[in-house]
Amino acid sequence: MKTSGSIKNSDEASKRLRIISDTLLPVIFLLFMVLEFRFVLLRIESNSLFVYDKDYLLNSFIIPGGFIGWTGQFLTQFLHYPWIGALIWIVMAALTVKLARMAYPGICGTFWTVSYIPVIIQSIYCLGAGYGLFIMKSPGWFFIPSIGTILVLSTVVLCRWTQLSLFRWIIIIVSSSAGYFLAGIWGPFSAIMAAFSIFLETKKDFSLLIIAFICSIGLPILLHIFYTSFRTDEIFTVGLPLINYKSQWPVRLPCLLLMLFMIAAPLLKFHDNHPETSKTNIIQISVIIILAAILFIFSFRDRNFITENAMSAAIDVQDWKKVTDILERLEKKNAKNDEKLYKQRTKKISKAAGTKEIESIVDLYSERFYEPTRIMVLYKDLSLFSLGTEAENMFSYRDGARKQDRRYDIPMALQAGKQLYFYWGLANYCHRWCIEESVEYGWSYNTLKYAAMSAISMEEWDLARKYLNILGKTLCHRKWADTQLALLSDRNKMQAANPYKTVLPLMCYDDRLSNDQAIIEPFIMNHFTSHRSGFATPQFDRAAMLWTLRTQDIKLFWVTFLNYLNTNAPTVIPRHYQEAAILYSHLEQDQGILSLPFDRQIKEGYDNFVNYVNSHQVRYIKESAYPFYKRFGKTFWFYYYFIRGQETF
Amino acid sequence: MKLALKITTVAMLLISCGSSIPESSNATQELPTIFPDYSDITIPSNIAPMNFRILEQGEKFLTVFTSGNTRITVKGDMAVIKRKDWQKLKSSSTHIEVKVYVLNNGVWTSFKPFGMVMSDEIDPYISYRVIPPSVVTYERISINQRDLTSFREKVIYANSMVQNGDNGQCINCHHYRNWQTDNMQFHARQYLGGTIMAVEGKLRKVNLKTDSTISAGVYPAWHPTHDYIAYSTNKTHQSIHTADHNRIEVADEESDLILYDINSNSVSIIENDSNRFECFPSWSPDGRTLYYVAADYKAPFGPEREDKVFIDSHTIKYDLYRKSFNPDTRTWGPCELVIDAASMNQSITLPRISPDGRKLLFSMGEYGVFHIWHKDADLYIMDIADSTIRPLTEINSDNVESYHSWSSNGKWIIFSSRRDDGAYTRLYLSHMNPDGSFSKPFTIPQRNPDFNKTFLFSFNIPEFMKEQVRISARQFASFIKREAQPVNYQSKKGE
């Protein structure tokens, strides 16, 4: 038997726990979101667009629920400053928790950790999107479930708060009609949930529930004939996020779970007749731990994905050094782990019986060794080229084509096409991909910027002005637009400004009709290696050398190398070119080329490489790659023998 | 007494129309910079308000519209005129004078006034395709109709109404018989593909592809008096320029002409020379002559043909041809060369004959047939009686001019041009003067004058309509879901 004093103490303890939890969790979550997903948030923002323009708002009304997307876009713009954007998201999450407790006091008021569930679902949706962010079709998708949930919960709270029947009727009718117009299906759902909650609580007002159902089903059917921007079978899904994927489940499931929560919550009641509060507190803490674990498991924290986004953000501001620094840091982080894996693998191989087992061990471990994705490699090459150090350093980094950890089929052109084409001097193709992307996913800050830069580099001033004027109506990108507007119609000024001063020298090729078939790496490679014009610049020939080394084509190398020597006239031949020349001359048994002023150390290095090859039997390329990498990983020789047949997409 | 009445009327108008004109101002003989450029233009008497934005630097702006005794003043850099004020202006006189005042450092500058002269009425509706200038993605395409007397725009059909992620649909080539919408058609490609026709207001969906033709019907020309539609059938490819400002090239790999008989639901060949690309049919108003363009091209058929076409694309030149036709017997005369464009090192597309049958408007560029991507493409006009041709220098710009059509009264033409920014086509109107010259072209007015600056879609295939399309978008959408009816092929080529 509990005394009133002990009950009071237990209540106090529970309250204290709730206050601590409500205070600490948002702070922890904010840190987690910003520190871990900073660059993902930036990417989400750069793939979004919000324009301070009346027409832009009006345009959102072409589809029911367009306003929820417009509001989502408004909020997404603040992710430009990840701390602010994340803070807004967390404030909305806190509001969700508060409203859940007010709307469903029977469960969330007492067993308060339950009110965290919708926030966890929302955060899994946001932080678990991963590569899905590239194929999200709904504007403002990041905030849609948060806004939708708040809308539903606040309607329930409002209905519960008012005792006036008439007012409740108005709420139900407005939220199912105007709600549908503004928020899509979230509107009718909020009407039903409000009526449902009232009905459960009062066990009367059944007519309200019936009206809510009729309005929520009838009005959308009636209203849909006025719209031409969605299909009839989407009447009851508009307002939910959309993804360009064979199934909508990845984005719809979290919304469905949120709705299920809101349906289930009023049905559940926690009969708190002051049970063992200490026990309850333990359960509450356990729930928090479980929810945190769920979030940790389902948030997409793939290192390559985060690195790709970090590199991309640095490229967008032409911070080339940062791009390589990011990669270096990642490689350093992985070096220890790789060494550990290598030791483990060696141990296992030594114990293995038979070649089959060895092969399977090698295969297993090669998947676990660090390897960059193709986009990371291409970003790195581009950055080194822009820094002018590609001939010395392009093979100083890990190479490869680790498959992206994604379930969606997303071409590289969509992820990095604009950037790679623009900075490699293919402005028309950059512009083309900006347009294609805008058709599928709507215009974004990023597509507008690259489209503008393409137009500027092509001296299409009016076109550039069009894109820049739109960016001029944004909050976080108008400054950038102003700097670019200042370059228009002034060729000299433009040619001296970044990034044009590095891009324009690459735009020295004869026009040709072609098509990349959405596979960009071979297209750029082919462009530089097969379409040199008579007026090629030294920069073009440097780029051609980079791409030629990637082809591993000996004949092509000599042709390109000669062009490079002619236009660049280097006093010292860069390291990787020497490495390639020495290797290729040996492979072709042509000693003549060795009369060139090669660095003695590089020659010796090659001898060491040959000796090492001769003294170490290469059973499987995958097996020998790591020990060879440790000794010769930063040379072209390693690339030539161990990095072959890279898959691109 | 009369004078007093007049003075009172003017004074009342001035009071009723808000802002007063600056008492003193520095006059300049320069025209103000405005967007769109509506200075000194001829406009249809039934056109919507010609709103524009003043692009001059200033602290305050005032625009004064004067027509007869009516004076309307509009404050701000957006000269947006209320509809009722616009009606007043139009009803007062056929000449509207526009004067722009700009305040800078406390001093008003009055710019040289410009005029808008009202002329013949224009068909109240146009329709066009709203499309992004993309290459492979076409998710957001709609065919819209616009009321030229107001700013109302409605979707005739949008592909978003039926397509989904896996099943994309491209809609194109909307076309009407004699500017009337009871007989109209457009194509849907790929998902739920077929040609959607309204014949006397009744919908049908047909698949014009037969085993004996290259493709389904593409560019249509509805016969003005009989139930026939001439089509080109095309196998086309598009490719992207790496450096050229034209950006995209679309070229025929194969192209023929067919005739669809609506009543018998059958197609027959008009022209199918395998060494010649025939395209863009267009009927004379009496329906007794079919104009079209054609280019001679010889290359072996096979997988290399596509690449070869693109390599040769700069050398493929289309000439203008015509063929006589007896609509009662459905028999064709021989083909006759009308304009030998190739000999001028030029290439013709889109012949369009004026409703009186005396003029032929076409687009001519250096090569190819898809001039919407050719910056050198300009509009030309031919006098059919004496075959003289002249470039419409009063209309043309240094950018693309293409996709043009005549109003039903033959007094106006509408065409698309990329002159604004080089990438996004906009629709321009121009009036044909009695002497056969054309007035300064102007872009169709918009409620928000900035619209054309910010709208990131192109408009193409503008067509005049005497009336709006009455079939609703949802009706089209539900009809498109039906299976397309196959057509019969009639092998006999009428000669």
Image (spheres, helix red, strand yellow):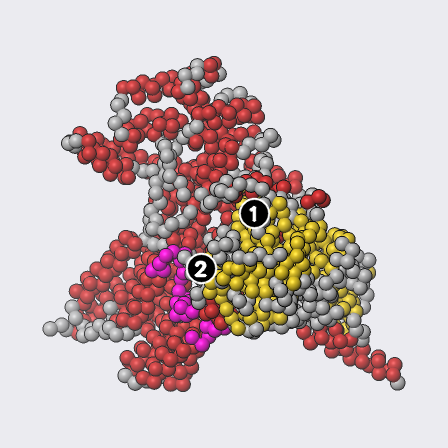
Q: Is residue A212 above or below residue A637?
A: below
**Residue B274 circle label:** 1
Magenta range is A221-249
Q: Earlier in the sequence, mark 2 or mark 1?
A: 2
- Host chain of mark 1: B
How many residues crowd around disc 1 within 10 Å: few (fewer than 14), some, or many (20 or more)?
some
Question: In front: A633, or B277?
Answer: B277
Determine if residue A39 is in view. Answer: yes
Tell me the SS state at disc 2. loop
Question: Main SS type for the magenta part?
Answer: loop
How far apart, in angstroms, are the residues tagged by discs 2 and 1? 29 Å
The quarter of the picture where residue A505 lies is: top right
Query: What is the quadrant of the N terminus of chain A in the image?
Result: bottom left
Q: Is residue B206 above or below residue A163?
A: above
On the image, the x and y values in percent for residue A464 come to 60, 50
* Residue displayed at 41% across by 67% down: A234
Whether tag 2 and tag 1 are in contact, CB under 8 A, the answer is no
Determine if residue B131 is in view. Answer: no
* Residue displayed at 34% across by 64% down: A255
Look at label 1 and name its amino acid. Ser
Mark in front: 2 vs 1? 1
The quarter of the picture where residue B155 lies is: bottom right
